[in-house]
Amino acid sequence: MSSTKTLRHAELLRRHPKNPLLTAKDWPYAVNTVFNPGAIRMTNGDTVLLVRCEDRRGISHLTVARSKDGVNDWQIDPEPTLAPDPINYPESVWGLEDPRIVWVDEMERFVITHTTFSRGGPGVAMSTTRDFREFDRRGMLMPPEDKDSALFPRRFNGRWLLIHRPVPSAGRAHIWASWSPDLRHWGDHSILLERRHGAWWDALKVGLAGPPIETAEGWLIMYHGVRITASGALYRVGLALLDLDNPLKVVLRGDEYIMGPEEPYEMTGDVGGVVFPCGHTIADDGDTIHFYYGAADTSVCLASGSLSEMINWLKAHGRPGGIPYD
Ligand code: BMA
């Protein structure tokens, strides 16, 4: 175990002083809550968030919020950008949730993987777009129950690789990876990152946070870990590093979470005790990461850090993922 003396998670990530950046009060139309946004930086430098908005029925849709600096002056679409369409897409009847966005050079499109809440439970769906105005909806990729999905932005040996998080009936859930030759047929499923056991902060479920981040040292991933307590679930965020050429190999996994709910806006809301990142942007220096997260299933917040510091922290506080030590 790494000692608490050397734990620097509080310094690793800096919450923005303007948090929460966006709440239901900022929305141009009536919603219950706004949270868990996907994020991407456009070539002109603008930040685009695809925000999960829960309406007052309880059904979620996704709406674009754009900003020049990723903090101020959000231009929010006047109506839902990507909404459930139960007639044409029955799998979306109870809503669209928690998008992750990647730019795929080969397709010259953004690929959005998101939860689609069907009558049979939540599964993973894919939509693509060039402009966040028109979308090509490709339906459900992974049947219920499955969530927390992102596509790697390029192929490995000719095949696409998807991260996702099926939930077995026992309720405890690991992060999985699956391969596809065509983004339609998926197979060769395997566990990528296991939940831990007992008292660990990530003992109940783990799920991907934002999409994998390509660095010289490997694919950096943030993931959420859930632990059940007497007063409900705690959602915190941890780090792992995957091999650059073989992302199924977990090079390092941090023992300790790097961020947990602490601030009042993270502790209080529709679901208190939750920080839930789904997307990030990288600044021009190639190192500063701004990640956007849902706080307490109620608002959109921002925290920033440095990719090199996060990797250095993992080297000090992590160990190879395949070794059982929990
Ligand atoms: C998870 C997801 C998230 C949500 C979190 C806490 O299962 O559904 O969308 O933020 O629970 O409620």
Image (cartoon, helix red, strand yellow):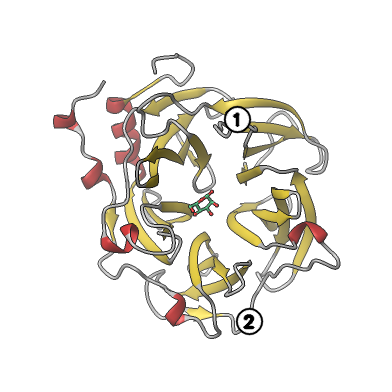
Where 215 sits versus 99, above or below? above
Q: What's under tag 2, amino acid-wise?
A: Glu
Q: Does residue 113 appear in the picture of this structure? A: no
Q: In which quarter of the image is the C terminus?
A: top left
Q: Which residue is drawn at 78% across and 43% down?
A: 183
**Label ID, residue 227:** none
Q: Residue at x 43, y 81 (%)?
A: 25
For label 1, the SS is loop
Q: In this view, does 152 lie to the left or right of 260?
A: right
Q: Mark 2 points at which residue?
A: 79
For label 2, the SS is loop
Occupied quadrant, residue 302? bottom left
Q: Which of 107 and 318 is in front in this view?
A: 318
Could you tell me residue 65's position as x and y percent? 52, 74
Q: Which of 322 and 298 is in front in this view?
A: 298
Could you tell me residue 245's position as x and y percent? 58, 27
Where 315 sits versus 66, above or below? above
Q: Name the residue under label 1.
A: 170
